[in-house]
Image (cartoon, rainbow, N blue to C red):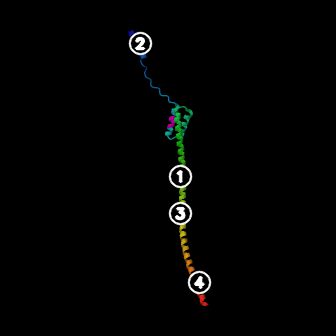
Amino acid sequence: MTRWALVVIIVTAAGCVLSDPPPRPPAPPLVRPSVTLLARADGLVADGQYTDALEAYGEILSKYPDTDEAGRARSSRETLGNLLAARARIARLTAEMKAQEVQMKTQESELARVRGEVTARDGELAKARQEIARLSAEAERLRTDLEHLKKIDIDLERRRK
């Protein structure tokens, strides 16, 4: 029986040696730091933290300039820089527009005041023209009366002679 036991042990050991080893779980893929940093920068953009994202893209370009991620980081940084510049310009133009609206309202109220003054002066001018017309008519009447009185005086002078 020892022989049989010895044969079983040898066959079992040989079977273990000849069989495939149990499969190992696959090794996690190595993630390059530039990929991780690029994903972090993209996440910052998605969260609206644009200044921090610009710094992260810049870090990729300074630490990993020769990687595939550097090209995308460069274009993303440029696009993000343009976006921030456009936002700053929009904010500046919006502030200028609000200032101009305030100025325009001030000018509109000044215009309304001046229009009121013009209307009042137009009324005064119309009254002055009426007065001039009345005085001109009276002057003409007085001139006619004076001419009439002169004729009377001349007639009286002739009669006395």
Earlier-in-chain disc, 2 versus 1:
2
| Amino acid type assigned to the residue bearing label 1 in the image | Lys
Return the residue at label 4.
Answer: 150
Q: Are marks 4 and 1 in contact (CB under 8 Å)?
A: no
Going by the numbered disc 2, the residue's amino acid type is Ile
Q: Is 127 on the left or on the right of 14, as rendered? A: right
**CA distance for labels 2 and 1:** 94 Å
Which of pointers 4 and 1 indicates the residue nearer the eye? 4
Q: Are marks 1 and 3 in contact (CB under 8 Å)?
A: no
> In the image, which is nearer the foreground, mark 4 or mark 2?
4
**Which element type, helix, strand or loop, lies under badge 2?**
helix
The residue lying toward the viewer, choosing from 121 and 46, is 121
- Contact flag, marks 2 and 1 (Cβ < 8 Å): no
Q: Say which label, 4 or 2, has the lower sequence index.
A: 2
Residue 34 within the segment the image draws in magenta = no
| Quarter of the figure with the N terminus | top left
- Which residue matches tag 1? 98
Which stretch appears magenta? 38-42
Looking at the image, tell me whether mark 3 or mark 4 is earlier in sequence order.
3
Percent position (x, y) of residue 57?
54, 36
**Mark 4–mark 2 CB contact (< 8 Å):** no
Identify which amino acid the numbered label 3 is placed on.
Arg
Q: Residues within 10 Å of mark 3 (few under 14, many from 20)?
A: few
Give yes or no for residue 40 being in the magenta stretch: yes
- Label 3 or label 4, whichever lies nearer to me, is 4
Check residue 10 in the rendering and tell me which mark sits there, or answer none.
2
